[in-house]
Image (cartoon, helix red, strand yellow):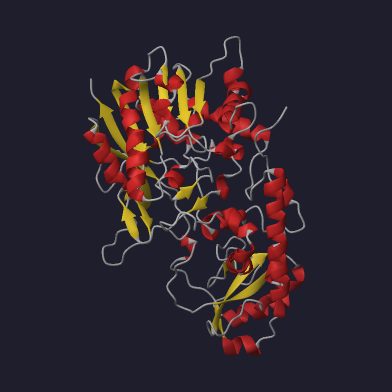
Amino acid sequence: MTKWFYEKNVYLLEHKVNKTFEEVLWMTTDEFRQWVKDLREVVVFAWDNLGIPPRVGYNEEEIVDQFNKMTSFPVHEFEQVDELTGEKDVIRNTSVIGNAVNQFFPTMMKTRINYTKDVNKGKSIYDYFAKDELYETFVTYASRHFKRDSFYHYSNPVKVFDRSHVEKLPVTNEAEEWIHLFEKNYRQRGEYDYWLESTEEGKEYTGYNEKLKNQKYLFLTKDQIEKLQIPDNCKTNVNFEKSETCRIRVFKLGQKLFPVGLKAFRVSFCQYAVNFPPLTAKYLYEKFTKHIRNQERILIYDPSAGWGGRLLGAMSINDEMNIHYIGTDPNTDHSTENGRTKYHEFADFFNTQTNRSYGLFPKTHSYEIFQQGSEVIHEDKKFQSYRGKLDLIFTSPPYFAKEAYSEDEEQSYKKFSQYDSWREGFLKKTLETCVEWLNNDRYLLWNIADAVFDGEMLPLEKDSIDILTDLGMHYLGKLKMSLAQMPGGNRIDEETGLPKAKNFCKVNGIWLKYEPVLIFYKPL
């Protein structure tokens, strides 16, 4: 039986290219460049031939366990109060349960991200591994994140009177004394080592680990470094042109770069396509179908099925309800065999491998997939049978050309390469179908946010609201789907004391970015 998902990435984790931090730290420039070349080749081979992108992944048992947990997960607890407004309108989902669905879609990280209106200039994480012209950029990023450990994954600065490892490392307020004590009493133990990081003492911290703010660390001057008998391996990152002071950073020997280092590819190398959180989808489905929960069958339509997060959310809905999910998406990368798609494969996997399939009377939800664009689906005779019958519409449509999901000519960014034509030819046509196909006394949820191209903010939110209200829908406001706190993110404006992000909220004292989920109602 074919497995349509990849499992845990043991190929990379067990490969010789998965060095320890000290092995990379101590490399010469030429050795490091060769390691980068080898790493790229290994990742591309695993991706192209084994279908495994540079992510850790779960094994089959863990995937099933995740899916089982979804069915009883208390999604109502996601509702949080925005302290700025006092409204309980924030969706705060910090769970990773359901993310295993990503393993049915290995092309997610091959999605090109566009920052300009030239839709052919976008790059994907895959491009950074595969394209020769991006090798030098890759070397620069890899040096920053692995050789200099910018994410603080493997090493931490030594604080003044740092007692976190009091039995294994020196404790002092003098950098010179720390070096003397380490070299005399601790090096021979072979458990820890240190390296010197060129950075200015007292410089305001702007890095990735917020826990390092407002701390006092041990620094050495250039004169001290030249005077002390410090091993050359500890000075591979010293650059006096950058700074004449260095911070001492200590690390435990033997730490493999991966899996923890895989995060660097997703966070810093390139923006990447993300799935809609399946549990958030489940929460929204259940919340906006409460008034019809006893209906014989509830029809949910997803105009942009994407990477399957919303389909998985539908499959996991309370089994007291009878759900039929309908999804459209033209991405042929999702095709499998015999007219089936990845959506079919993982939905069937959910329905046959989880607890839903057990017992004398298994309770599973149904689904239907149309491999067509939402702007033309109204022409499909089978889809026409749902006209005026849909009970909930919810999707996260393309943000114009921000994500090039595939190179299919049927992709909306290919068909409509200018925003004005995309708005009229894709967005408006899709929404016209949604409104006409939606039943009365039902809701339409639209997860979209304004996007910047060439420095210009495109009004995706306003245009969506204007189109839908012109079509007779009642706009009821929005829910704020909070985003994960990204390292180094949520910068605060010194003058206003507020985040610089366009959309932000505050939950339990924490600033969070959010994406709007616009809520529309079709009256009786």
Residue at 34% from the left image edge and 27% from the top image edge? 288
Image quadrant for the C terminus?
top left
Position above or below: 105 against 135: above
197 horizontally vs 390: left or right: right
Residue at 57% from the left image edge and 58% from the top image edge? 264
305 horizontally vs 518: left or right: right
Position above or below: 381 against 171: above
Percent x, y of residue 109: 57, 49
The quadrant holding residue 436 is top left
Image quadrant for the N terminus?
top right
Position above or below: 282 against 510: above
Mark count: 0
Q: Nearer the viewer, residue 200 or 523?
A: 523
The quadrant holding residue 103 is top right
Percent x, y of residue 70: 52, 30
524 horizontally vs 220: left or right: left
Residue at 36% from the left image edge and 40% from the top image edge? 425
Percent x, y of residue 177: 61, 81
Viewer can see residue 263? no
Percent x, y of residue 87: 26, 40
- In the orientation shown, which residue stands out farthest toward the top? 360
The quadrant holding residue 34 is bottom right
Viewer can see residue 305? yes
Residue at 43% from the left image edge and 49% from the top image edge? 401
Position above or below: 374 against 15: above
Q: Nearer the viewer, residue 504 or 170?
A: 504
